[in-house]
Amino acid sequence: MKTKIGLLYGGKSAEHKVSMQTALAVTRAINYDKFEIHPIYITDNGEWVKGPRLDAPAESVKALEFSQAALPSPGFNPAVFQSEEASLDVIFPLLHGPNGEDGTVQGMLELLNLPYVGNGVLASAAGMDKVAMKNIFAQAGLNQVAYVSFIRGEWEKDRETAFIQVEEKLGYPCFVKPANLGSSVGISKAANREELRQAFEEAFQFDRKVIVEQGVTAREIEIGVLGNDEAECSVAGEIVPKKDFYDYKAKYEDGDTALIIPADITDSQYEALKTQAIRAYKALDCSGLVRADFFLTKEGDLLINEVNTMPGFTPFSMFPLLWKHTGLEYPQLIERLVQLGIERHEEKQKIKYTF
């Protein structure tokens, strides 16, 4: 009996294209002897379309883009989660960014009482919002760089005060980021007041809230975490961008970045990295997977930067590569995540909701 997977991808966010590449990669790696794949495409306009069952890998991204005309009526219809024969066994969200990775879709799946892969509502929402995430990390006693945050409305009313606050609390250089986007979309480095102004304007195009972080000279070390209540870590990897920082183009377009796996760190640094990653994982109540990103300064200080609750997931992305070097190949990683999603759902069914 094959496990019926609803592959959920696309999405109404700036990371739509990233999600499409991820979905294509999964269709090409998954074991069709074990799994029956039902694609569910969310257009960049937010329309949901259930495509025909896949019995073989998709030929291209284009082949995974289905027409709105396939829907029986406009707008979202929960019937996309039903196959002709029976309910889907598990949903595999391959969504990046808002309206997918931020707890919204996870909340809908909870209401439908459907098993799904990856993090739940709380971890997804907090992991997407960099300000909330860093506040939780601070409460958990994790070391991180100094930061401040701003809402668009307050910044527009008094830009000068915002600039002064950044300069007094953080100084230059600093990094300005949309609070709720990944894949380095909308991130800018500022070395002076004019660049700071431009960075704010860039970031506010993508979100109503931005975070500004103190610049630090450090190595970028990442580690994968896999599991539910009991989690394990992969080997560590290092990002070595040839540009000034690891931006969207370096990640997805230029290929102008070196990924060093395993990272050249000491055993004690690796143990500290694992300990901090698991603490962050538990602080956010994560499940399934995260990629935890750290800074390692030349003085040897380890600072958590962020966790990504739905990291890049093509075979050439850091998270799958970390697990490949740990001994878990991409197809087996997919199977493990599906298993974890089903196990978490079964655990939740033990909860009593009536008295």
Image (tube, rainbow, N blue to C red):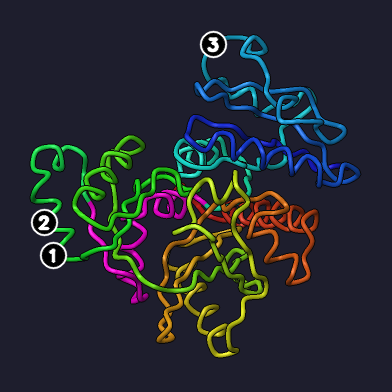
| Figure check: 91 above or below 71 | below
Q: Earlier in the sequence, mark 3 or mark 1?
A: 3
Look at 34% across and 50% down and name the residue there: 177
- The residue beneath circle 1 is 168
Q: Mark 3: give few (<14), some (14-19) or many (20+) Cα within 10 Å.
A: few
**Foreground residue, 145 or 8?**
145
Q: Characterize the magenta stretch by its predominant secondary structure.
A: helix
At label 3, which amino acid type do we have?
A: Pro
| Figure check: 280 above or below 111 | below
- The residue beneath circle 2 is 164
Residue 74 has which mark?
A: 3
Secondary structure under badge 2?
A: helix
Q: Quadrant of the N terminus?
A: top right
**Foreground residue, 116 or 302?**
302
Q: State the image coordinates of residue 171 (x, y, percent, origin top left).
A: 21, 65
**Foreground residue, 47 or 79?**
47
Q: Quadrant of the rendered structure where residue 318 is?
A: bottom right
Give the alpha-carbon distance from disc 2 to disc 1, as whole Å. 6 Å
| Figure check: 62 above or below 118 | above
Q: Earlier in the sequence, mark 3 or mark 2?
A: 3
At label 1, which amino acid type do we have?
A: Glu
Is 99 magenta? The answer is no
At label 2, which amino acid type do we have?
A: Ile
Look at 23% across and 53% down and name the residue there: 149
Q: Quadrant of the rendered structure where residue 229 is?
A: bottom right
Q: State the image coordinates of residue 135 (x, y, percent, origin top left).
A: 30, 63
Q: Quadrant of the rendered structure where residue 78 is?
A: top right
Q: State the image coordinates of residue 93 (x, y, percent, origin top left).
A: 61, 41
